[in-house]
Image: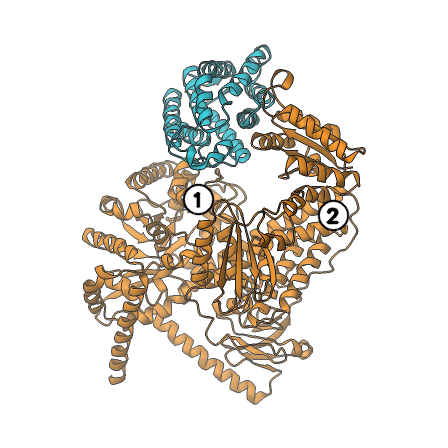
Amino acid sequence: MVGLVLVSHSRPVAEAVADLVRRAINSDLQLTFSGGVGEDRTELGTDAIEIQEAIGTVYSEDGVLVLMDMGSAILSAETAREFLSPEQQAKVRLTSAPLVEGGIAAAVQAQLGASIDEVAKAALQSLLPKQDQVQDVSPAAESVPEGSAPPVNETLDVTIQNTHGLHLRPAANLIRTLSKFPGEVFVENRTAKRGPVRARSLVDVTRLQIHQGDSVRFLISAPDPKPVIDSIQALVDSHFGEFGQPAPPGETSDRTDDSRPFGVSRGIAIGRPLLLDTIVAAIPSYAVESAPDCTREIAELRSAIATAIDEFDSRIGRLRPSLHRHDLDVFDAQRMIFEDPTILNEVEAKIREEHLNAAAAWHAVLSRYAADQEKADDPYLRARAADFREVDRTVLTHLVDGKKGSGLPEQPFAEPTLLICEELTPTLAEELHRLSVAGVIQLGGGTTSHGAILARALSLPSVGGARKKLDLLKAAQRVAISGSEGLLWIDPPADILSDLVSRQQLERAELERALQESHAQAITRDGNSVQVGANAGSAQDISSARMNGAEFIGLFRSEFLFQNFDREPDEAQQLAAYREALAPSAKSLPVVVRLLDIGGDKPLKFLSQPKEANPFLGVRGIRLLLANPGFFRVHLRAILRLADSFLIRLLIPMITDLSEILATRNLLDAVAVELTNENLPHQWPIPVGAMIETPSAALLIDQLLPHLDFVSMGTNDLTQYVLCAERGSAALAPFSDALHPAVLRICDQVVRAAQKHGTKVSICGEIASDPEALPIWLGLGLREFSVAAGAIPAVKSLIRKLDVSRIAAQLATRRLSFAGSTEVRTFSRSLTSEQEAAADEISSRS
Amino acid sequence: MSNISAAQFFAWIERYAAHIAEQKDYLTQLDAAIGDADHGANMHRGFQAVLAKKDDLQNSDIGALFKGVAMTLISTVGGASGALYGTFFLQASTMAGTKTELTPGDFASVLEKGLAGIVLRGKAAIGDKTMVDALQPAIKAYKRSIDSGESLEQALSKAVSAAEEGLKSTVPLVARKGRASYLGERSAGHPDPGATSTVLLFRSAAESLT
């Protein structure tokens, strides 16, 4: 029988409630109480040790539920629970249920022999009958399906404008935003008469199937509903963060017809087909009877989920430079599925109540969600089924013993190979990049699936919807695809093949020409030469940067290298990791190495630090390095030794004022002396620069410049710090644009000061490659850019069309009058179209 | 730099008990303004119970000393401060282990471990108008000072100033944790009692550890 412990600050209260419960139930109970402190326990207060003993007296394998009054009673109960053994802790629950009503409701269930889950649930719902009777709770809340319904004190009716309705990405934005407020919010689809559901679980919200034009009601139960309402309204107005984001061009067509292949990512690919079996080997299924076994299964599941999330994050991290922010949001939404509370609850219930093992329970629940999603009317939403299937598979591979890998070889393919798979996933995409796969044939997938986005981001030719051809594909010797037309040939006859080969050569030649042009220096129409470099985080990125004509690596992010270390890497490990990653720079491409830039928002497994209330304003970048002098010293030694054989410039992240630059320089001087004394080859001095990403550094720029060899403007962080707008917040989308006039003014100051001082200044944020932003940066006087490798050809080609002195003159007259980023963008568009027209005219005349 | 012995740590606890005894009415008065008027009395009861175990505690290693203090506070204080200060010393004891003296640097790690325990237990952050507002800056100031090679005396004096600054910062704040949060806006304008007793903790340290 589940045991019950009643805790109150007042011993008489605790004792009397226990008496009340016993008399109300009039049956055997495992029930006890704790309360009061001091001599004779007459003082008000709670004693964790006494609570622990109380739990001990009613403890059994069935578990114990602890009900408390409030405040320190909760702290003491938590402390008491911590004193128990881990096995006991797993079976002892604290509940927020009210002491009297909860106590009685729990006791009723307990003496019926109910499980701890049922007892806890009964306690939590114990106020419902009373609320029904007193009728002081708004009727809207009565329709909330499960759990105890808190009183709703405000409602908001809106009409959804988003083209695809509230699918995963906007729903994820909604949940993320609401999680910041105390209280509860429920969502109801009034048009489809679905809900209300708690706005806490992604799957619950998406199951409401909210489409464009649907009328949606938000029911708010919060101590202070006003800011909640305002935030929801702001989200609705900004289309839940899909602000100004049209669907990918030509990709919105309805792909309900699964029978014919369709184009997913442009390009022609010809080669040998390779069928990839991504189905996890047999999913084991066995009964889990005892409670400890259930607990163990759940623990294994949770750890598999945690590992899967780590892996997912690091893969997305590595793909990040190739993806647009819009696309990254999609993955962000997918990430939420891993941790969705509704899914977890269902899986855990299956384990505890249906006695399924973790793998089988997980697969059953996730496949059902995938199947539900496939029933959606909207093709975009249907494509999201793939997201659930991938989450399912990823966790299963970690859960199932003797897991089956991706089935892909270690070495790149020797001959052109087209991969046939269910759908392209982030996990696969990263592998394909590595294996130089020629193209991808997806059996399912849609034009808006993750697989499609990834294929386009990686310039990998791909078609989708090839399921009906699977048998033919399996038997084929050679296949060919044209991604732009959505055509698939199986063992094509000689004439078609030769036609395809010549088209492919033409495509390649075009690509080659663009690339070749990209290897030449970019010079503006009025004769200003501009340096274009690439951002990188791995050897692969540097190779791709070289291929695309990068003149330097403007930002090498050290973070990805360090993610692979479980504990603090020593000097030799750091040096080896850097050497391997920088190898493709062939010691001829200058590389700006940014010192390890981490903080509370992106922690590593080592260099841990207390959780911060606001990590972006916390101990990150140089602040964290200076706070860990031991690690910092080793890090700098590794970089100076690296500089012996590579062209290294050192970039300090997150500079606030001069003291940090001086401290770093002093340390560099000191480690250089050490290295000399130890006879270790190294290079010092090397150019030292600062990342200008805090408003403080920008304002103090004249003080910093004498101590710096170059500066680099990090517009991503600078924008969020100048505009006080969190980067990920959908409601603040208009304030996430680096072209905001406030950001422009501050950048303008930095560029002028740097020019006056003769210091090189570059820009390396995402915004550097934005075609609407580039003319503005050039107009402000910037001549060095570092962008994603794939963007270099386009950036260079745009630079060649522009007349910078004209832009500077036009910008000078308008610069101070811009009121918002939209105005700046309109101005930039008119500027570019005018100049492009002029450039085309000149080239057609010549 | 000189190390801190178990005997000094016991002297610290004794000193703190004396401060609490002296200030218990003031602490209770502060708590009356925004809480349930028991902080001074509760802390006093707890630390008198600690003093009653003097014979056991004063000959223990540092881990056992802190653990003894922790368990006594947890079972005798009664209010949230018992669970919180108790957790602080309990976590600190796991870090100190069986050592009989600590370097000033070790002491920083011990304090940080204790802070982490409090943050986890009370789920409070800087700005919530709790003892964390005084504790966190004090520990940071102490660690920074030790790391930059200053003496224990300087480090503790900086910790006291940082705790006092932290306490001052709680005056205009609106409480977001604990009983005081029920008052909402009305909790502004009063110093937080927990942060006040935290300042005393560091004052006692400055008076007894060097």
Q: State the quadrant of the C terminus of chain A.
A: bottom left
The residue wearing badge 2 is A352
Mark 1: give few (<14), some (14-19) or many (20+) Cα within 10 Å: few
Give the number of the mark in front: 1 or 2: 2
Is A248 left or right of A769, judged from the image as shown?
right
**Corner quadrant of residue B163:** top left
The image quadrant of residue A3 is: top right
Q: Position of residue B24 (x, y in %)?
A: 47, 17
In this rendering, the answer to whether A802 lies above or below A241 is below
Q: Which chain is cyan?
A: B
Residue A552 placed where, x, y %?
35, 59
Q: Pointer 2: residues within 10 angstroms few (<14), some, or many (20+)?
A: many
**Residue bearing mark 1:** A615
Placement of A92 over or under A512, stated as above or below: above
Chain A: what color?
Answer: orange
Disc 2 residue type? Answer: Arg
Q: Position of residue A446 (x, y in %)?
A: 57, 72
- Quick one: which residue is furthest to the top in this view? B55
Element on which disc 1 rests: helix
Q: Relative to A91, does residue A239 appear above or below in the rendering?
A: below
Q: Is residue A675 visible?
A: yes
Viewer-proximal residue among A518 and A809: A809
Give A579 or A432, whichever is nearer the viewer.
A432
Q: Is residue A765 visible?
A: no
Q: Earlier in the sequence, mark 1 or mark 2?
A: 2
